[in-house]
Amino acid sequence: MPVINRFADLQSDITAWRRDLHEHPELLFDTHRTAKIVADKLREFGCDEVVEGIGRTGVVGVIHGKTNKSGKVIGLRADMDALPIHETTGKEYASKTEGSMHACGHDGHTAMLLGAATYLAETRNFDGTVVVIFQPAEEGGGGGREMVEDGMMDRFNIQEVYGMHNMPTLPVGMFALRPGPLMAAADQFTIQVEGKGGHAAMPHTTIDTTLVASQIVVALQSIVSRNADPLASVVISVTSFETESKAFNVIPQRVELRGTCRTLTPETRDMAEAAIARVAENTAAAFGATAKLDYERGYPVTLNHEDQTAFATEIAREISGTEAVIDNVDPVMGGEDFSYMLEARPGAFIFVGNGDSAMLHHPDYDFNDEVIPVGCSYWAKLVETAMPA
């Protein structure tokens, strides 16, 4: 595997950075320790400019090449935040913060981009400018949106932007991506069902919200099977069913349903939102109850741009070989807020293999440190190829 030799030399240092971040996970925008470490290291590496506090707690570093005849500026993004999960890996560097852990590999993403920044600041073997972006709050906080809305793209004149995420089960050294929709729009909904509560022994005097809500849960799946195009991906999951009563002999007055809806196109997203409201309201009405939908749109579709995806594919093949790059991987129905950056600028998001690890968001998950030279080499090669000196 033709990784850049410098990253083999730096692997132990980058691994130590990664494991320190793993020991001290921080949630959402509260990435103060992580952001300070990132900013201090970027200054230590000799970045030409380091700016903190973008998108609340985001950090941006600017590295100029040996020359700037091209005037080109490329952004590279890593996420920094952890998840509210209790870690069970048993590793010596396991989380020291109860109830929080790096269960998605953002510690590895941050460490790899820091490693790439070290090399790029040392060598500056490119013609143009690279902007390294360290983002908070990917896990539900919309940190990518916050950084874009804070004017990051215009402030640093970023013209293209690239992101990377590890993928368990994909072997170390392999990459996977696709042009177009790579990850889903992730929306969430709450349905308030109201009927008429009463005694469980006299259901005929009530409007049973438990029954009504159960019918809604089942009926929502007809949207996937009967309203969506069979070739369009839609996932509707009701993940919480909560009544206001815990008693065995009470039919509750109200039931609250919560869940998510995931889609890959704007048209399917609009259809699903309208259909969820229609199905919930009309199903409830059929039983004499009412249902009120609160639908909140989350991250948009992560949409890879064609030219930049072709370029990213070429770089991945140079690092790992043609056979180690899947260039038309199936879309993933998880969400990713790098999508906001791809809405603001052309670019591409790529998966890098994490090997035989636990799945993302699992308490036994750990980032595979053997990925570090591969990911760092991808970043460096992308910059040097896009902006040849």
Image: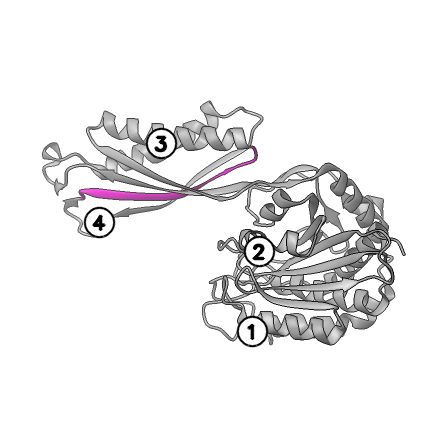
At label 1, counting other C-alpha atoms closer than 10 Å, the crowd grade (few under 14, some 14-19, many 20 or more) is some
Q: Earlier in the sequence, mark 3 or mark 4?
A: 4
Front of the two marks 2 and 1:
2
The answer to the question of whether label 2 and label 1 lie on touching residues, with beta carbons closer than 8 A, is no
At label 4, counting other C-alpha atoms closer than 10 Å, the crowd grade (few under 14, some 14-19, many 20 or more) is few
Q: Which residue is mark 3?
A: 277
Stretch of the chain drawn in magenta:
252-265
Return the x and y of residue 373 as percentages of the image width and height. 78, 63
Residue at 73% x, 76% y is 44
In 3D space, how far apart are the residues under numbered discs 2 and 1 (Cα atoms)?
18 Å
Q: Which residue is mark 1?
A: 33
Q: Which residue is mark 2?
A: 147
Q: Earlier in the sequence, mark 4 or mark 1?
A: 1
Q: What's the amino acid at mark 1?
A: Arg
The answer to the question of whether label 4 and label 1 lie on touching residues, with beta carbons closer than 8 A, is no
Is 260 colored magenta in this rendering? yes
Q: What's the amino acid at mark 2?
A: Met
In 3D space, how far apart are the residues under numbered discs 1 and 3 (Cα atoms)?
43 Å
Q: Which residue is mark 4?
A: 244
In 3D space, how far apart are the residues under numbered discs 2 and 4 (Cα atoms)?
39 Å
Compare residues 3 and 173 and report the one nearer the observer: 3
Residue at 72% x, 63% y is 62
For numbered disc 4, what is the local secondary structure? loop
Q: Earlier in the sequence, mark 3 or mark 2?
A: 2
Reply above or below: 64 against 211.
below
For numbered disc 3, what is the local secondary structure? helix
